[in-house]
Amino acid sequence: MANLNSKNLKLAIQKEGRLTDETLEFLRKSGLEFESYKQRLFSSCRNFPLEILYVRNDDIPDYVASGTVDLGIVGQNILNEERPKVKKLLNLRYGFCSLIIAVPKESEIKDIQGLKNKTIATSYPESTRKFFLGNNIPVEVVSISGSVEITPALGVAQAIVDLTSTGSTLALNDLRALTKVYDSEAVLIANEQTLVNGKKDLLSKLLTRFKGVLSAKDYKYVMMNAPKSVLPKLKKITPGLKSPTISPLAKEGWISVQTVIKEDVFWETIERLKQVGASEIIVLPIEKMII
Ligand code: AMP
């Protein structure tokens, strides 16, 4: 790493795996320009003092904790399991999955109480022990590094604790989920020193970009036409972030209104706007929103 600029921020991301594509997409949406090709070890951003290092997923928390890099993007599941000394800065809203407990479809076990004194195979032994201890259920935990889903068929365990997102691996292996241990998504983590040392300002600029991409997911930009007389009603329905932008239309007594609507109340808001007289409603996605 001799040729990395020590004044730049360093961010470790997964070299190859489930989080890689979405992480690269997220960084590019944040306006960062860099090359990325298969055999790369690191990329320097052209338009921001940031070096991106491509490393093994499981190594990211250690690199961040030791200060080898300032920042990392990993699944929350790795933090829950390893409890590294790092600071979580942001949930990134991709890489969603859940750590679940599953048993063979035909198993008589109906709930977690039925797992008392049973053997559980997992790549997440710490999370598993903590869960069963918390529920006062004694179990034997067997730590397996991969293909945990085949262990019940091999007779190694009566249940597994594993990550799932679509449930297809469970179905493929004739397994049935009993309960969820926790939900996970990609998160941005930082070295605790980076938050206080000379890179604090750079980090704050990078966070503005990241938060801009994340908050854009929460809103939609809406343009509509309406009779001027209904403006008070429109304003009430779409309080928006600030007040809406209003321009007169060539048609006498009509206005064009531009505003933002929160994603979680989007369709009900559109219905209410139509009811009070808004028409020609145009919806645009927001790429970034810097507030
Ligand atoms: P990989 O090393 O490619 O298996 O990626 C593992 C990371 O992707 C995990 O640490 C999770 O944060 C995330 N992930 C998202 N969905 C899943 C899934 N269905 N199974 C395993 N990992 C997942």
Image (cartoon, rainbow, N blue to C red):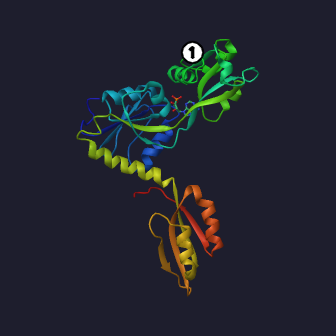
Left/right placement of residue 114 relative to residue 34 reads right
Would residue 45 be visible to someone looking at this image?
yes
Q: Is residue 73 depicted above or below 117 in this figure? A: below
Left/right placement of residue 270 relative to residue 32 reads right
Would residue 47 be visible to someone looking at this image?
no
Q: Quadrant of the C terminus?
A: bottom left
**Residue occupying image coordinates x 27% and y 40%:** 8
**Residue occupying image coordinates x 51% and y 54%:** 218
Measuring from the top left, give residue 70's x and y in whole percent. 32, 35
Closer-to-camera residue (131/2): 131
Measuring from the top left, give residue 72's x and y in whole percent. 39, 35
Closer-to-camera residue (151/20): 151
Q: Quadrant of the N terminus?
A: top left
Report which residue position mark 1 lands on: 141
Q: Quadrant of ligand 1?
A: top right
Left/right placement of residue 167 relative to residue 125 reads right
Q: Is residue 268 depicted above or below 256 in this figure? A: above
The quarter holding residue 253 reads bottom right
Left/right placement of residue 200 relative to residue 237 reads left
**Residue occupying image coordinates x 61% and y 73%:** 280
